Image (cartoon, rainbow, N blue to C red):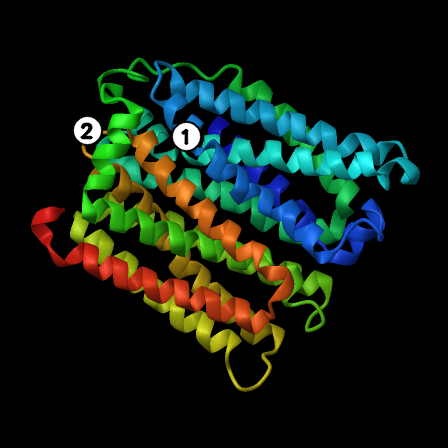
């Protein structure tokens, strides 16, 4: 519960500026200071810092007590980010629309993004430490879903509370998370024999395994591109629907992803799917998502909100169900290498793909962004097929 609260808050904080109509961000920070590229950069600090912090995350989690330290650092960074964002807003409009306030907003997003890398790169380590083998995928699914739930809730609360309200909520959640994680006990196995292989040595070993490298690369591309696509709803759908409607569409998509994640976690616990079966299921689910997104966004006629919502729910279920399979497979195929290193590499690639996707968004049309996502999904499917072809290598 303590870990889930931290990751929930991190996801909610990260999407705050993209959860509302871009005009609201300009009204708060100054219309002459905030362009579409500025709003994209505020969002893109997530993947940028995710890539930058990955080496430190993988190294810290391999220490004795490293999982607990990573959680504490993530919670502290979220608290610092909340304070930086809220302070100028409390001082009034002139202070809020100053260069210093905009700089603080960027720094806050950077701190929040560092927290995301520390926490989300430790999900497989959490399940390995605190849960038996039969429950690991379900635990990983719950850890992933809590972060995604934060972004889902932001889609709805952003239009309702406004930016200042979201800042205050984030601060309250950050204080609760920091207070809770302060009492998180250290597991006796944290930093034990499983961490015997060094971080650098473990990375070299994993990347020499073609099947592991293919799995992690494909998983990182598809999850990163999809995360970027989801986070841009307010930009890509502006003009077609109202701000509130877009928020509910994003919430429906995210909620379906959470249900898919938890459902697959339960199925994996009950059926104990083999490695090859998990990869096959992930590929099948990605295929469903591919057709769902293609039909929803590239149809010949505009979609009503209800029709688009139905397609987004289907795509969310497929994407969400594939995530815990990919995270757990990355940890399992890593062999003696630390789980935090393996999943940290996946999260680093995820952030790199998301960064590229969001970086090109200001000058791209909604149709171009969707086609880019479809290309990423097709490449990921081809890579997954390659990874499942030779069973003896898995």
Quarter occupied by residue 11: top right
Q: x and y percent of residue 375 in the render?
A: 40, 67
Residue 3 in view, yes or no: yes
Q: Characterize the local packing of mark 2: few (<14), some (14-19) or many (20 or more) Cα atoms within 10 angstroms.
A: some
Within 10 angstroms of label 1, few (less than 14), some, or many (20 or more) residues? some
Residue 19 shows in the view: no
Q: Nearer the viewer, mark 1 or mark 2?
A: 1
Residue at which label 2 appears: 336
Side of 358 relative to 126 (left or right): right
User: Where in the figure is residue 27, as x and y percent of width and height?
Assistant: 84, 51
- Location of residue 368 in the rendering, given as x and y in whole percent from the top left corner: 54, 71
Disc with the residue nearer the chain's start (1 vs 2): 1
Q: Secondary structure at mark 2?
A: loop
Q: Residue at x 80, y 29 (%)?
A: 87
Give the vertical position of 123 relative to 313 (above or below).
Answer: above
Task: Judge by depth and name the residue closer to the eye, 271 or 204.
Answer: 204
User: Could you tell me which residue is drawn at 27 percent across and 50 percent down?
Assistant: 215
Residue ID for mark 1: 55
């Amino acid at each position: 519960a303590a870990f889930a609260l931290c990751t929930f808050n991190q996801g909610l904080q990260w999407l705050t500026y993209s959860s509302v109509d871009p005009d609201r961000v300009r009204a708060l920070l100054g219309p002459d200071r905030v362009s579409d590229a500025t709003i994209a950069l505020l969002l893109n600090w997530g993947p940028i810092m995710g890539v930058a912090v990955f080496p430190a995350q993988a190294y810290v989690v391999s220490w004795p007590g490293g999982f607990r330290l990573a959680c504490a650092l993530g919670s502290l960074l979220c608290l610092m980010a909340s304070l930086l964002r809220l302070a100028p807003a409390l001082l009034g409009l002139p202070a809020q629309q100053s260069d210093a306030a905009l700089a603080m907003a960027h720094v806050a997003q950077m701190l929040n993004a560092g927290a995301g890398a520390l926490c989300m790169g430790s999900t497989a380590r959490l399940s390995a430490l605190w849960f038996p083998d039969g429950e690991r995928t379900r635990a990983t699914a719950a850890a992933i879903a809590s972060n995604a739930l934060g972004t889902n809730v932001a889609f709805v609360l952003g239009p309702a509370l406004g930016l200042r309200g979201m800042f205050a909520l984030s601060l309250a959640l950050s204080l609760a998370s920091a207070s809770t994680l302060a009492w998180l006990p250290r597991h006796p196995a944290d930093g034990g024999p499983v961490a015997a292989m060094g971080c650098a040595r473990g990375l070299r070993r994993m990347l020499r395994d073609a099947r592991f490298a293919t799995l992690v690369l494909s998983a990182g591309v598809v999850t990163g591109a999809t995360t970027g696509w989801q986070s841009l709803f307010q930009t890509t759908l502006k003009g077609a629907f109202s701000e509130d409607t877009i928020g509910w569409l994003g919430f429906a998509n995210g909620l379906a992803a959470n249900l898919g994640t938890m459902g697959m976690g339960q199925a994996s616990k009950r059926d104990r799917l083999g490695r090859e079966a998990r990869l096959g299921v992930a590929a099948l689910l990605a295929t469903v998502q591919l057709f769902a997104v293609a039909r929803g966004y590239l149809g010949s006629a505009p979609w009503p909100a209800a029709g688009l919502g139905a397609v987004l729910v289907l795509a969310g279920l497929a994407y969400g169900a594939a995530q815990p399979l990919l995270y757990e497979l990355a940890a399992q195929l890593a062999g003696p290498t630390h789980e935090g290193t393996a999943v940290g590499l996946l999260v680093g690639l995820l952030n790199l793909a998301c960064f590229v996707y969001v970086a090109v968004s200001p000058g791209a049309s909604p149709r171009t962004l969707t086609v880019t996502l479809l290309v990423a999904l097709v490449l990921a499917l081809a890579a997954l097929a390659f990874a499942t072809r030779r069973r003896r290598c898995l």
